Amino acid sequence: QVQLVESGGGLAQAGGSLRLSCAASRSSISFNVMGWYRQAPGGQRELVARISGSGSTNLANSVKGRFTISRDDAKNTVYLQMNSLKPEDTAVYYCNALTTFPARNEYWGQGTQVTVSS
């Protein structure tokens, strides 16, 4: 069973920064895609950013220019650097990992709270 353990959440002021980390319990090279999703109170879970094994990235329009996703396969870890934080970034952030071969499997972390005060 794969475990994804997030860390780095907390409270930040608007305009501030936080860095989230997600450590996988097995080699991250095995994951085709790793990413971050978030869910605000009363809202649906939405994609924030994802990164492929080749390093290609996709970011939600709402975070482009402010957030950066990266992965360090030597540490089996994916990061989300969040700058210029806004109160609307407040949510629980979830790490996600996806494999597509030999079968499609998707894994989720337990979530970490990010709260941005104005």
Image: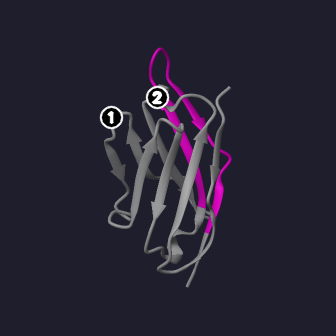
The type of residue carrying mark 1 is Ser
* Residue to which mark 2 is pinned: 29
Label annotation for residue 1: none
Is 62 on the left or on the right of 26, as rendered? left
Q: Secondary structure at mark 2?
A: helix
Is 30 on the left or on the right of 53, as rendered? right
Q: Is residue 44 visible?
A: no
Q: Residue furthest front?
A: 74
The type of residue carrying mark 2 is Ile
Residue 4 rendering spot, x and y as whole percentages: 63, 40
Q: Which residues are magenta?
A: 92-114
Q: Secondary structure at mark 1?
A: loop
Residue at the image point whose x is 49% and y is 35% from the top = 74
Q: Is residue 71 visible?
A: yes
Residue at the image point whose x is 47% and y is 14% from the top = 102
Residue 61 on the magenta segment:
no
* Residue to which mark 1 is pinned: 54
Residue 17 rendering spot, x and y as whole percentages: 50, 71
Q: Residue furthest top?
A: 102
Give the mark nearer the N terminus: 1 vs 2: 2
Residue at the image point whose x is 52% and y is 36% from the top = 97
